[in-house]
Image (spheres, grey):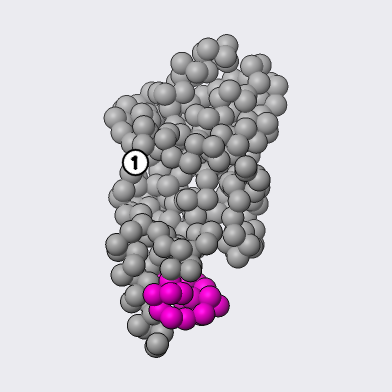
Amino acid sequence: MLEPERHQIILEALKVKNSVKLQELVELTNSSESTIRRDLIQLEQGKFLKRVHGGAARLQGKLQEPSMMEKSSKNLQPKRQIAQYAGSLVEEGDCIYLDAGSTIFEMIPFLPENIVVVTNGLTHVNELLEKNIKTFLIGGYAKPSTKALIGRGALDSLEHYRFDKCFLGVNGIHSQFGYTTPDPEEAMVKKLAMSLTREAFVVSDESKFSEIAFAKIADLHLATIITNELDPDTQEQYHSKTKIKVVVTS
C-alpha cells in the first residue's frame, strides 16, 4: 500500500473515533508496526493528529474549551499525582499564583498552610480558605465555563503582585507553538502571571501535548512542565525545548 493511502486510512479511522491503537492501524493498512510509527510521526509533524501511548488521537479544535466540570472529571488519578508533586514544590513562606485550571485545583490539599496565594480561580477559594491559607482573589469578569476571572480588571489587579512560583493550566503544549488556550483574554492573564513570577510551572497531564489552541500564552522555555508518563520520543522532543518533570503515576 502506498504512503498516501495509508495516511488516508489513518485519518479516516480517527474521524470515526477519537483515538486508535497502533495494532488497529497495522491491521487496517496491512503494514508493519515500524511503518505505521513512521506514518504517525509524519502526520503529527503535519499537525493532522497527535501520537499517544500505543497509538494516535484526534486533535482538539482550536476553540474547543471543556467546562470546569468536564475537565475535573477527566484523567483524575494522574492529575492528582501530578498535583501532589507540584504542591511539594511550594515552600513555607512562599507567595504563589494559582491559575484556574482543574489540575491546579487538585494541588490545594498538598500545599503548606503558611503561604500566600493569589488566584483567578473561583472554584479554588473555598478549598484554600478551608486550609487557612491566606488568599487573594483578583478582580475581573467571571467566565462561566472555566470559573476564571479574566479581562481588564483581572490584568489590572494582577499587576499589583509578585510571586515566588506560578502554577498554570493550559489547553495545548506544542514543541513549535508553545503553550496555548482557546480564549485570548484568558491567555493574557496567564502570560502576565508568568511575567510576574520567579519560577513558572505548567501543570498538565499528557493529553495536552501536541495540541494547539487558538491563543498563544508563551514559548515553551518560559515554564517548567510537570506532567505524567510520556512516550520516549515525546519526552525527548520536549526535553530539548524546556525543563520537564515527568511524574510516574500508577
Q: Position of residue 113 (x, y in %)?
A: 64, 16
Task: Name the foreground residue: 19 vs 49.
Answer: 19
The residue identified by callout 1 is 66
Task: Name the foreground residue: 224 vs 196.
Answer: 224
Q: In which image quadrant can residue 81 be found?
A: top right
Instruction: Give the vertical position of 117 relative to 222 (above or below).
Output: above
Quarter containing the N terminus: bottom left
Q: Residue furthest right?
A: 92
The stretch of residues the image draws in magenta is 25-47
Q: Residue at point 48% right, 26% down? A: 119
Quarter containing the C terminus: top right
Q: In which image quadrant can residue 93 be found?
A: top right
Judged by its main secondary structure, the magenta piece is helix
Say whether residue 20 is left or right of residue 106.
left
Q: Residue at point 41% right, 84% down? A: 3
Instruction: Give the vertical position of 93 relative to 165 (above or below).
Output: above
Instruction: Give the vertical position of 48 relative to 161 (above or below).
Output: below
Let me know if residue 32 appears in the view: yes
Q: Position of residue 101 (x, y in %)?
A: 45, 35
Amino acid type shown at disc 1: Pro
Let me know if residue 193 appears in the view: no
Q: Is residue 249 magenta?
A: no
